[in-house]
Structure formats: C-alpha cells, structure tokens
Image (spheres, rainbow, N blue to C red):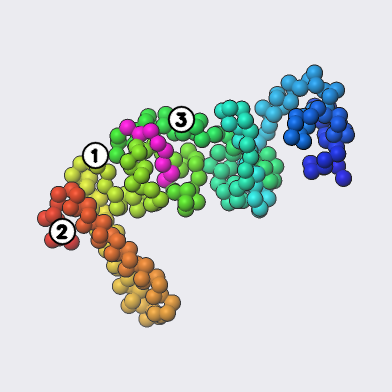
Amino acid sequence: MIGSSCLLYKTCKICGQTKWYKCFESKGKRKRRAYCKLCKSRKNEIKKSASSIQYKFDTNLLKKSEIIVRLKLPSKKRIKYKVSYEQAVLMVEEGMAGIVDESYIHKFYDYQTFKKLILKRDNFTCCYCGKFGDTIDHIKPKSNGGISSFNNCICACEECNINKDNLSLEEYLYYIEPISVSGNIQIERLEQQLHYLLQIIESINSRISEENYSKDQNIEGLSQMIQQVENTISKIKGNILISGGENHLVKL
C-alpha cells in the first residue's frame, strides 16, 4: 500500500513521482530526503514551495482528535508535538497557527520570538502596576486552558507575574494590590471587593428564600459561595492593613 506511512515508497516533492525508497538519499536514522536523486539539482525548489504554503483557518476542517503541531525554532531545528483538538482550535482562532490538513497545523511563533513581540508591543511596561516588565503573563492561566497568544498575553513585571500565579484576571484585580498604586486606587478596589461580596451574599439569600430550594441539590453550591465570602473578607482585611487603613475596618 502506497501512502504517507509506507516505508518502501515515497513521493518526490519536486517531480511528484512515487518511487522506491532507495531512489531517495539517506539522511541517517532511517530517514530519506523529500526529493529523489534525479531531482537533487533542483532541491532549492522545495524551500520555495514550503515558504508558499497556503494555510487554512477554518477550524471545521480539523479532525476532532489529537492534532500534530509543527514549529521551526530559531536554530532552524523543526520540532513537533501533539495537542488536544480544543487547544488546536484556540491556536488557529487566535492567529497563532495555520491549518495544513485535518490533523496537522503549523505554529507561527517560537517562544522567544513571541516573548520579544509581546514585550515590544507593551513597551516593556507591566500592565498591572506600570513598572518595567520583562516577563509575559497569561491573562487566562494556562492551567485553566489559556494559550500563548497575542490576545491572552501581556507584559508583566516579575513580582506581579508571581503574585497573579494561576488566578483569573478578575480574581487578581479583586484580591491583589500592586505596590505602586495610589491610595485612591486602593480605596476604589476595596469598594469593588465589597460590592462583589454583597453580590455573593445577595445570591445566597436569594437561593435560600426560593420556594423550591432543595438542601440536597444546593448545599454544595452554597458552601462554595460561603467559602468565597470568607476568602473575600480575609483578602479585604489584609489589603486594608497593608494600605494602613485600619479605620476602614470598622465600616466593613
């Protein structure tokens, strides 16, 4: 059977003819050149054709299974790895990769190139505290399914990057106070936290007062809400003490 997995025959990428594998020069490690020996003098044509690949970006073309990702490193070395279908879709939709075929995509940027582009775009300024930044942070953490893309990554200083860790952007803005912010901004964020806390409490009261409320069905959800309240109160108290606003604690 002749095909991409056949070990006896290959198709020359220059003349397009399918030939016995020994008609292709060995590259070592049981690998053969992409062009046959007769086309050796025309090998530069492969590089031209590779650079003119017409990528597709319709994610409906992707097979709903693991997808192979290929990437060219600055060292010119080519690597490949597998990602889930969902990750592949995100990479294509975010403009980080192009579809070659149903189970194969090309990633456009290696990590170092991508990092340089993000830092240059944000002028080496931390998007959280305004200080000098030389790291990149994922707005939606990778642990929660976020990917390295221009929409999901921003410049951050090392301290803010460490503090944010795997928090969502909303959680970070509620709970963490960057050192460089003014007192007014700290007060505004404390008010945001209080508003968030009141929303949770109102939601708990609403669920308890419902006529169709079932303890068995909702006990876990209420426990989670109560835990959110406790965590928020703890964070608010900590932020007030850090900012020297002990007098505001009474108003809570």
Q: Which residue is mark 1?
A: 180
- Mark 1, secondary structure of its residue: loop
Task: Please give the name of the residue rendered at 48% of the width and 38% of the height, measured from the top-left corner.
Answer: 150
Task: Please give the name of the residue rendered at 86% of the width and 31% of the height, measured from the top-left corner.
Answer: 22
Q: Amino acid at mark 1?
A: Ser
Q: Amino acid at mark 2?
A: Leu
Work out whether residue 235 or residue 63 is closer to the camera in this orientation and state it. Answer: 235
Tell me the number on the disc at residue 127.
none
10 Å crowding of disc 1: few (<14), some (14-19), many (20+): few
Residue 13 visible from this viewpoint:
no
Residue 12 visible from this viewpoint:
yes
Work out whether residue 200 or residue 114 is closer to the camera in this orientation and state it. Answer: 114
Task: Please give the name of the residue rendered at 43% of the width and 44% of the height, measured from the top-left corner.
Answer: 138
Tell me which numbered mark, 2 or 3, is placed earlier along the sequence: 3
Q: Amino acid at mark 3?
A: Lys
- 3D distance between C-alphas at marks 2 and 3: 44 Å
Task: Please give the name of the residue rendered at 14% of the width and 51% of the height, measured from the top-left corner.
Answer: 245
Q: Which residue is mark 3?
A: 116
Give residue 250's position: percent from left, percent from top: 13, 61
Tell me which numbered mark, 1 or 3, is placed earlier along the sequence: 3
Give residue 108's position: percent from left, percent from top: 58, 34
Name the image quarter holding residue 181: top left
Give residue 187's position: percent from left, percent from top: 20, 49
* Whether residue 247 is situated above or below residue 98 in the rendered picture: below
Q: Which residue is mark 2?
A: 249
Residue 138 lies in the magenta-colored region = yes
